[in-house]
Each structure stands twice: as structure tokens, then as C-alpha cells.
Image: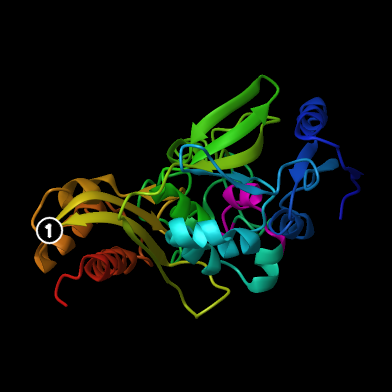
Amino acid sequence: MNPFTYARPGGAGEAVEAVTADPGACFLAGGTNLVDHLKLGVASPTALVDVRGAVDDTIEESPDGGVRIGAGVTNSDLAAHPVIRRSYPVLSSALLAGASGQLRNMATTGGNLLQRTRCVYFQDVTTPCNKREPGSGCSALEGHGRDNAVLGTSEQCVATHPSDMAVGLLVLDAVVVVLGPSGERRVPLADLHRLPGAEPERDTVLERGELITAVELPAPLAEGRGAYRKVRDRASYAFALVSVAALVHVRGDRITEARIALGGVAHAPWRARRTEAALEGRPLTEAGLRVAAEAELARARPGKDNAFKVPLAVNTCTAVLRDLTGVGS
């Protein structure tokens, strides 16, 4: 392991200043992702700035009926909070589907959003990886590709984003509060993560020194029905092959509002806008639900090993929507 310095700033502003001033510094929260990268040689910072005591770790209801979640709130505490379980059950379900109990006790809200891909080539420093070393090539294009993305890929990267929580937050229209050298700004979660394009090394739109300090949720969808379903190789402690977060409002025989997000299929949590558009205002039928799910996956570009993800995503999305709407029951 390479030597590094360690600092525990007293506040978020001090933490931002410390990382901004040192090109080799990075933020440390729960460490469930960064410590792995230190051990593997994927990351070699010269300084760690521990923000666990610098960012808020409370959950507060807002006057507008929403919720503000401090970036330091652990995944376990967020999943178990009475307000989240009552008003945002899709988020609680997504959190409980991730990692293990021990990891959820350490992982933070801010850190979970910023975890990097679990692509086997990204984590193996003996292989080319454009995300780890820009311009070196993408080993996953012709290598082991079962876990690769099928949506939003580029010739530079086909890695997937691993977060369950981010998929749950996406259907809730969450907003991420960020503090940086230029002050505070708010970034809709839908705009936080980047597709790989020609710069796969850039996971998010955050600039150097910017720190996530909170996540804000709007008031819950009135009479909305939500669910999170994760398909994986084993029942726990496994990343999603495909996951679906859905939130719908049903009136009579029609969906009046639909929010759908997919995980395990793209470089970023993926909002299924085409599926949403195909659902809203249409009569509820089994065939209609499947057609809507297929509308999003029609633009999928799978590789040689992961074509199964396309029908798997369609089937999982259809099943979740069927459960939420009662179609066929």
C-alpha cells in the first residue's frame, strides 16, 4: 500500500478546502468502496480526508412534505427510518437489497452514490481499462462480458453502475446537494451520473473538490404504489444483473403517472423514459405492460455474453408493473 496522510476536518467547507488544495487528496466516508481500491491498487491517493464527522448524518422532514437526508446517513439507518419506510418504501427496499448488513452499517448515502463500477477489468490493474487508465483500452469489450451494460455504452466502456440505492432514488426524483470551491449547488440525481462516451473515467458531473452533503426528496407521490426488484445470481451480497424500481399512480384502468428506473444495465442508473411514456394514459393490459417495457430495451446493444439481459429486463419490468397494477390477478 502506498503511504498517505489522513485528516479529519471539522466541517464540510474545511473538507472541500483540503481536497481542493491537494491534487492527490480524496474524500473518505464509509470506505466500503475506496478501501477495496486502495488494496487492489486501483486508487493511490496521497491524502485521505475523512468526512464522516464533517457532513450531516440526520434525516429531517421538510416543510414541503419532502425529506432531507444527510450525506453521512448510513444505508442501514436510512433503510430503517420510519419516514422512509412509510413514505418512500421503494428506497428502503432498494437499500436492503444492496451489499450485506455489515456493509450497510458502514456505507453512507453520499458514498453510495459515488461508488465506482465493479467491472472485473477495472479492478484488475494488470488489464487495460479506459476508466482506470484513459486511452489504454477496454478489456471488457472482448473479454468476460456477462455483467456488462446493454444501454448507453460506448466503444470506450461497457461497465455498469453498481448502486441499488441510486436506482431507488432515481424514481423518487431526488436532488443531490453539493458543496464545492464555488459554493453550494443542487444537481438532480438524473443528471449526476454520466454515460461513458469518450471519457469513461468521469463517473459523475461533479468537479474537483465537490462534496455531496445531502440528498433531498420531494413529497411522495400521492397514492403512489412503488416496488424494487433485483435479479442476481444469489439471494444476497451480489450485484444486480437487472434491477427495476417503479412508482406508479393508478386511476381506474389507467396509469396516470409512471416512474421507472433500471439498474445493472448501464453505466449510470437508467431512467426508462420510453417505458413511462408508453404507460401513461393507456388502458392497463398485460400486453400493454410488456410493450411499454420493450420500448425502453429496444435500443439495447448487448455484447456476446449478455444478450440475456434484454429479455430479463423486459420480463422483470413487466412483472413489477403487473404486481403494482393488479393486471392479470
Mark 1: few/some/many CA within 10 Å (<14, 14-19, 20+): few
- The amino acid sitting under disc 1 is Gly
Which quadrant holds the C terminus?
bottom left
Please report the residue visible at 45 percent of the width from the left and 54 percent of the height from the top: 167
Name the secondary structure under disc 1: loop
Instruction: Judge whether 208 appears above or below 232 on screen.
Output: above
Indicate whether residue 160 is drawn in magenta. no
State which region is magenta: 106-121
Residue 189 pos. (x, y %): 48, 40
Residue 113 pos. (x, y %): 58, 48
Residue 138 visible (yes or no): yes
Indicate the quadrant where residue 286 lies.
Answer: bottom left
Spot the residue most to the top: 182
Instruction: Judge whether 311 appears above or below 292 on screen.
Output: below
Q: Nearer the viewer, residue 40 or 173?
A: 173
Number of marks drawn: 1
Please report the residue visible at 17 percent of the width from the left and 63 percent of the height from the top: 290
Please report the residue visible at 44 percent of the width from the left and 56 percent of the height from the top: 87
Residue 20 pos. (x, y %): 77, 27
Residue holding disc 1: 252
